[in-house]
């Protein structure tokens, strides 16, 4: 049984990277990825206990804690194995002890002061300086993965997609790709096109929203309003194209039913061009706002080394200089020739994360303008591949690489695992908060702009 | 000082601005387990296109300052207590609005053991705003009804 750890270590030395670990009542499953997009799923029977891999891949920390809470698996060597999903435990069971002169705790949440999702943060501080942060999320845990079990593969999609309204397309497509991988289906170029379009429409409104959120975090009402107005236009565009502002209902396993007439596609393209120009000018205004810009550097730093250690993904990792993007090697999607961007000043602070959104928006506009050409008709995934019991799907959501693993039992879901970019990045938020002032946390948090719903499921 | 106040009053009377509604409402939002879609639309309801604030509707930081508790999501078992705590922290009279199909108990997804269900299971709901999610205009229109004398 200990070969779980050995095989994982071997794979790491072979150039594979950790992407996910989850449990079933009898197995531990570890997902690894390579730069070229290939994935490797290692399965090990656990009988209640396996050696930890958290020292080899600290990014697996949350995954092991979740597997323990969910299926009671012990991870030898992962000490203390703190609960993640489980609540109602003594404070000292889930927080890190921080002692010293004047060290004290500040508890925030689960209900926050604005229109924000629910989650609890326990700051260990001296004065206003944050020494450590324990995040207790999963207040919004709906047990979606478990509830999907026994449903048909088609029905299962909703459980992945509605895990998060902000990442509904990304989560839904990752799920569809996983199912198709298991069913031996490969998306045709037409299907790849429509799904890529959905992913980038989602990224467009998300990134516009995230820039607005940082402006709000600084208290710059003008910037916030301008980018919020652009976000509204991006969501209206979603509705014009797909009938839903968050693209709900646009993804299906094995194909796509979206039908968008040429004139509508053409008008959408013009709106994307207009949004590109207007966000450019809005961005320029932010650049020339000295008091706004002064607020951003050196706050909430996540450097490249720590981003790698913690397994950070998406804009947060790229803003630290880690040029990884699942789009660069995506299969079943239309990202040919896509190369990740990183900012010139990849300092991994609030400013770099903000700039990263602006850079990625330019890419997104470009991809959208390329894909919004001609009518969009129904599309299918083509049979001919190998059928297998477990399939894997990976996409780059607005928050980062998202993996979905679906085990099927015939045409039903036996086990669903959704590991989103937000799930991957929450430990990085806690890390980036350390050393900063408590009042800076909202700004730091907004610069990551992670979903709680995506992590809690 | 008094002259200043008198001038100000005259200025207000003389300007051609439309008269505001004679009421305002303070809203406290609680996410009881949503998918975040309802939050994103609520956020845009306060942005330039709809701008709830101009009608006298504002989101406030504490339930102690709130007239209305605006709840999103199916209530999860873990959010049950925090939601009730927020409600009981509100001054009376207080009202509860359920925002989105999940909060109304429609089409719920999840494990039975993790969900309490509709907001109505826990609190008296005065205003229902259906939709998955309801868009910002719909949210604003529904909330404006709260300004009408009941
Ligand atoms: S009603 Fe729809 S948008 Fe709102 S929380 Fe539920 S699933 Fe999400």
Image (spheres, rainbow, N blue to C red):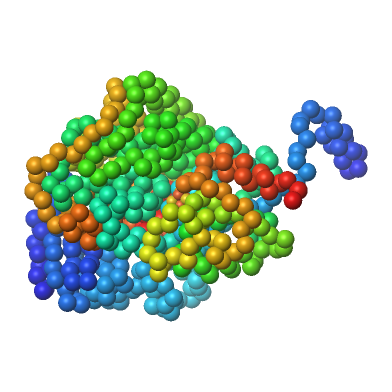
**From the viewer's perspective, is B88 left or right of A412?**
right
Q: Is residue A146 above or below residue A349?
A: below
Residue in the foreground of this view, choosing between A286 and A448? A448
Q: Is residue A137 visible?
A: no
Q: Position of residue A99 (x, y in %)?
A: 43, 77
Q: Residue at the spot x=57%, y=38% of the render?
A: B137
Q: Quadrant of residue B13?
A: top right
From the viewer's perspective, tell me whether residue A217 is left or right of residue A326.
Answer: right
Residue at image location 42% in from the left, 30% down from the top: A240
Q: Residue visible at 23% across and 64% down?
A: A22
Q: Residue at x 18, y 67 (%)?
A: A28
Number of numbered discs: 0
From the viewer's perspective, tell me whether residue A436 is left or right of residue A317.
right
Q: Nearer the viewer, residue A195 or A149?
A: A149
Determine whether B35 is above or below B10 in the image.
below
Q: Position of residue A297 (x, y in %)?
A: 43, 46
Horizontally, is A285 left or right of A9 in the view?
right
Is residue A101 at all visible to an observer of this figure? yes
Q: Nearer the viewer, residue A259 or B17?
A: A259
Name the spot of residue B7 as percent of width and height, x first. Answer: 87, 35
Q: Position of residue A13 (x, y in %)?
A: 10, 58
Q: Quadrant of the N terminus of chain B?
A: top right
Q: Please, is residue A156 above or below residue A319 in the view?
A: below
């Amino acid at each position: 049984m200990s070969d779980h750890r050995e095989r994982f270590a071997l794979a790491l030395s072979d150039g594979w990277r950790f992407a996910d670990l989850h449990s079933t009542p009898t197995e531990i499953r570890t997902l690894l990825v390579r730069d070229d997009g290939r994935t490797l799923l290692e399965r090990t029977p656990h009988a209640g206990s396996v050696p930890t891999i958290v020292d080899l891949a600290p990014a697996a920390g949350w995954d092991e804690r979740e597997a323990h809470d969910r299926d009671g698996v012990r991870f030898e060597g992962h000490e203390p194995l703190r609960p993640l999903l489980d609540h109602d435990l003594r404070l000292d069971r889930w927080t890190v002890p921080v002692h010293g002169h004047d060290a004290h705790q500040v508890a925030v949440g689960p209900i926050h002061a604005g229109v924000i999702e629910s989650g609890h943060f326990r700051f260990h501080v001296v004065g206003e300086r944050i020494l450590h942060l324990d995040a207790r999320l999963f207040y919004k845990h709906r047990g979606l993965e478990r509830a999907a079990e026994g449903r048909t593969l088609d029905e299962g999609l909703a459980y992945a997609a509605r895990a998060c309204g902000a990442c509904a397309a990304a989560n839904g497509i990752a799920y569809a790709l996983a199912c198709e991988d298991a069913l031996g289906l490969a998306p045709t170029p037409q299907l790849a096109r429509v799904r890529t379009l959905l992913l980038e429409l989602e990224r467009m409104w998300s990134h516009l929203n995230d820039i607005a959120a940082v402006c709000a975090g600084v208290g710059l009402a003008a910037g916030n309003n301008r980018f919020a107005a652009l976000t509204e236009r991006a969501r209206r565009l979603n509705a014009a194209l797909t009938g839903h502002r968050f693209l709900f209902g646009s993804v299906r396993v094995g194909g796509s039913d979206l039908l968008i007439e040429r004139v509508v596609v053409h008008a959408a393209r013009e709106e994307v061009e207009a949004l590109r120009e207007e966000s450019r000018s809005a961005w320029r205004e932010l650049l020339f706002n000295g008091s706004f810009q002064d607020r951003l550097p050196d706050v909430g730093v996540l450097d490249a080394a720590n981003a790698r250690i913690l397994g950070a993904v998406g804009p947060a990792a790229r803003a630290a200089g880690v040029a990884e993007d699942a789009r660069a090697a995506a299969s079943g999607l239309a990202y040919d020739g896509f190369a990740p961007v990183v900012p010139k000043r990849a300092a991994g602070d609030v400013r770099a994360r903000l700039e990263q959104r602006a850079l990625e928006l330019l890419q997104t506009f470009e991809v959208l303008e390329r894909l919004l050409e001609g009518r969009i008709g129904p599309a299918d995934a083509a049979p001919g591949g190998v059928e297998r019991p477990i399939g894997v799907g990976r996409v780059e959501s607005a928050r980062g690489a998202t993996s979905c693993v679906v085990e099927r039992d015939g045409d039903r879901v036996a086990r669903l695992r959704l590991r989103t970019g937000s799930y991957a990045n929450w430990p990085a938020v806690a890390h980036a908060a350390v050393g900063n002032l408590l009042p800076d946390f909202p700004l730091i948090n907004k610069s990551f702009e992670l979903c709680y719903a995506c992590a809690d499921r | 000082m008094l002259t200043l106040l008198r001038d100000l009053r005259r200025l207000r009377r003389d300007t051609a601005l439309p008269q505001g509604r004679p009421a305002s409402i303070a809203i406290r939002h609680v996410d009881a387990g949503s998918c975040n879609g309802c939050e994103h639309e609520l956020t845009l309801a306060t942005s330039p296109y709809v701008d709830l604030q101009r009608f006298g509707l504002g989101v406030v930081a504490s339930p102690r300052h709130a007239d209305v508790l605006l709840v999103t999501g199916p209530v999860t078992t873990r959010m049950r207590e925090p939601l009730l705590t927020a409600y009981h922290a509100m001054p009376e009279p207080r009202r509860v609005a359920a925002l989105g199909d999940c909060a109304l108990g429609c089409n719920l997804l999840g494990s039975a053991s993790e969900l309490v269900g509709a907001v109505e299971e826990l609190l008296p709901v005065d205003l229902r705003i259906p939709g998955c999610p309801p868009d910002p205009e719909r949210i604003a229109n529904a909330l404006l009804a709260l300004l009408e004398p009941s």
